[in-house]
Every structure is written in structure tokens, then in C-alpha cells.
Amino acid sequence: MYTHLQLRDSARPPVTLATLRHMRSSGEKIAALTCYDASFAVLVDEADADVVLVGDSLGMVIQGHDTTVPVTMDDVVYHCRAVARGLHRPFLMADLPFMSYPSKEQALANAVRLMQEGGAKMVKLESGAGQVDIVEFLATHDIAVCAHLGLKPQSVHKTGGFRVQGRESSAGELMRRNAKDLEQAGADIVLLECIPAELGRAVTAELDVPVIGIGAGPDTNGQILVLYDVLDITTGRKPRFVRNFMEGAGTNLEALRRYVQAVKKGEYPAPEHCF
Ligand code: KIV
């Protein structure tokens, strides 16, 4: 009963939403990573990452697709369950994949699957004005939600590719409005992908919930990177915001520790990783 109460005083108590809110208010940076299996989950946990995302990026880095569009609910549930087995401390978030949340009811049913079958504690969905009511519906059912704004990989065929978002002032203003609306609807975390650093700073300053960025500049409350980019497993051209933490590291665990420390100390992202 109430295992969390017993674990609260342990050396490495599990990260909760309350921990993440406290980190935001105290100025401690949140270090997040994606993960797709139990073996890496053990390492990511040992490296002291605060948040782990079972991202639909698994479609690209695990399954070899060009985009995240082919990823299914079954795929995310499978990988999430594996990751959950390897984790103790980090807060586990999982992606609702393409077209798994076209209505409030489907979003709820699939969020429940990620939590009950996958072991996720929070669900993430690519969001905009069209998802405000979905976020509200999930929040009223006490489901922890992360709203993903900026570059939305599930929409690449509509938006025309993997490009920096929010460069024009009108697009930036819309993103700021959307972020505020999603927060008011009940989003507990906002994730910003591939936007100008200035916009990342503005959105973070305007919200009360923790904001985690990937290619969104140094001023968000935390950073996330794709595990395989951090470990330099991904081949080919990499986005500007990626840093290879294997450089100078003897083991995968050391590279992951270097990433977590670089985020905590504000050394990553550096200006060369920003837009
Ligand atoms: O799917 C994913 O890995 C993500 C991160 C890039 C944030 O959404």
C-alpha cells in the first residue's frame, strides 16, 4: 500500500509530476531521453535521467521507416512494456502514435492502453488548437498529458518535411497561444521540438508547467534527445541540435551520464545546437 510513500525517503525516489514541477520552480534542469527496450532502460535509469519517453521515433530508429507515421498502438505498447521493466526512477512517458487520438474517446481508450498495458505514467500527443478538447478530456479523466508542439513528425506529409517551425512571427504567436490553451486545458508538460531558441524562451516564460525542448534552445526547463543520437548509433545526416555524447566516453553508460550532466549544468544545448 502506498509504496510511493516508502520510496520517497529512499536514495533514488521515483520521479513524479510533483518532482518535475519542483524542478521547474527551483531551476533544476530536467534531463530526458527516449528509450525503446529494457536493456537501455536500465542504463538510462543508472545515468539518472529524470524522464524517459517511449517515442514513436521508434518507427525510424528501431523499425527503419522514413517517418513515424507507420507506428501503431501495438508497437508503442510493446516497447513501453519492455522499457517499464528496466526503469525504477525516471518518469515514464509514452507517445500516442499517428491517428490514435482522432477523437476524445479514442484518445482516452489508447491512453488507457499505454498506462495499463505499457506501464506509462504520462501520454504525449502532437498538439495544436485541434487537440485542446482532447487534452481536456484526458485531463478530466486524471490522465497526465504532455502536449507536443513545434515540429510534429506525424504531420510531415502535410507540412512538407522535417523543418524548423515558428520562424515567422505569426506562426510563433500561434504556437504561444496554442501552448497557453493546452496548458489551460490540463496539459501537465509541454514539449517543444525544433523551434527558434527565442520562441522556446518565450513559451517557457509564459507557462507554469514544465517545458521540455528538443532543438528549442537552452531556456526550456529541460531537454530531451533521441537515445540513438546521443549514443551516435544513428547513421546519416543529423539534425543541428544533436550532440554525440559518445565522443570521449568509454561506455554507453558514461555517454548517458555525460548527457544528463551537460543538461543539468546548462552546457547542452550550446549555441551551435540552436536555431
Ligand atoms: O518520438 C519521439 O522520440 C519524440 C521526441 C523527438 C521528443 O517525440
Image: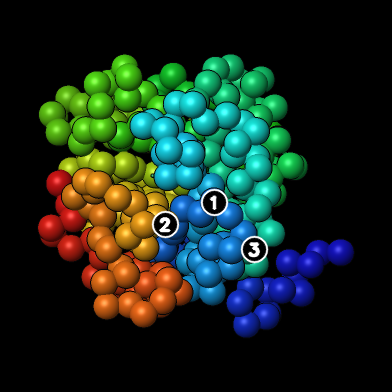
**Disc 3 on helix, strand or loop?**
helix
Q: Which of 173/145 is in front?
A: 145
Separation of marks 2 and 3 at Cα, in angstroms: 15 Å
- Left or right: 52 with respect to 249? right
> Does ligand 1 reach within 8 Å of label 1's beta carbon?
no
- Left or right: 53 with respect to 252? right
Q: Amino acid at mark 1?
A: Tyr
The answer to whether the residues at label 2 and label 1 have Cβ atoms under 8 Å apart is yes
Q: Amino acid at mark 3?
A: Gly
Picture coordinates of residue 94 (x, y %)? 56, 44
Dividing the picture into quadrants, the one containing residue 269 is bottom left
Q: What residue is pinned by disc 1?
A: 36
- Left or right: 214 with respect to 85? left
Q: Residue at x 21, y 46 (%)?
A: 237
The answer to which of marks 2 and 1 sits earlier in the sequence is 1
Separation of marks 2 and 1 at Cα, in angstroms: 9 Å
Q: Residue at x 48, y 44 (%)?
A: 62
Picture coordinates of residue 130 (x, y %)? 44, 19
Dividing the picture into quadrants, the one containing residue 40 is bottom right
Q: Is residue 87 above or below residue 254?
A: above
Q: Amino acid at mark 2?
A: Leu
Q: What residue is pinned by disc 2?
A: 227
Q: Residue at x 51, y 54 (%)?
A: 35
- Left or right: 252 with respect to 156? right
**Disc 1 on helix, strand or loop?**
loop
Mark 1 nearby-residue class (10 Å; few <14, some 14–19, many ≥20): many
Q: Which numbered disc covers residue 86?
A: 3
